[in-house]
Amino acid sequence: MSAQPLHIDLPDAEGLSVWPWLIALVSGACLIAIVAQQLKSIPESLQAEAQQLVSASGHEDLDVIANGRDLILVGTIDTRQSVAPLIDQLDLIDGVRIVRDDLTRIDVEQQAAQQTREFVQSLAGIETSAVAFQPGSNSFTAGSDVALKSIARLLTANPDRRIRIEGHTDDTGPAAVNLRLSQERAQAVASYLEGLGVASSQLIAKGYGSTQPIDDNRTEEGRARNRRIEISYVD
């Protein structure tokens, strides 16, 4: 008796439906897109919540960056200030893995003192004695503008600095006239600087007449030295 060949009836390939496969494929793609969007929104939500805490902390020069689930503090802070309480708050945000401190620490007082010294040195380097006036008037003599323009450049570059402008005269003439003239001259300097872009809040102008001589009024040379404008830094 001969063996019969094995015969298996396979379904017609053309009769198979592709819809289940398409549905599964589309569903998988949608799921991947949803997960990706959720993962993308995680750092965005962390960033927003962390930024609110940083803004409310009172530290003006700080910022926070979300890198995945990590938060990075950046910016500058005084060496005398602590951000430990802020870091503790950031660490409590749901979803945060770590909080990294990448802050630059500076000695604010030392930096401010150094900037003041540099300003005073720059001001002292300007030949303010070149600022002079026509006799008996508040009109500048030729060459006064060189020093005044240098002062204006220094002040506009340092808008938080102030100077005092003092007008002085010799003792020729009535004291009341000299006092008024010295005030007019000090104000003339202030007005000239304002015309060059210096804020009026940076300028204090005051006249002293002949009450503060620096030389002997009995000689022409001494009187010439006493007719002067003095400019100094106001702390």
Image (cartoon, rainbow, N blue to C red):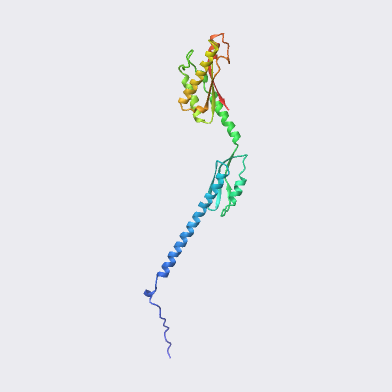
Quadrant that contains the N terminus: bottom left
Residue found farthest to the front: 176
Q: Is residue 210 above or below residue 84?
A: above
Q: Is residue 38 above or below residue 145?
A: below
Q: Position of residue 22 (x, y in %)?
A: 41, 67
- Between 19 and 176, the one lying in front of the other is 176
Q: Say whether residue 28 is visible.
A: yes
Quadrant that contains the C terminus: top right
Q: Position of residue 54 (x, y in %)?
A: 56, 45
Q: Position of residue 16 (x, y in %)?
A: 39, 74
- Between 199 and 229, the one lying in front of the other is 199
Tell me which residue sits at (50%, 56%) in the image. Answer: 39
Tell me which residue sits at (56%, 31%) in the image. Answer: 115
Q: Position of residue 150 (x, y in %)?
A: 49, 24
- Between 137 and 84, the one lying in front of the other is 137
Residue found farthest to the left: 14
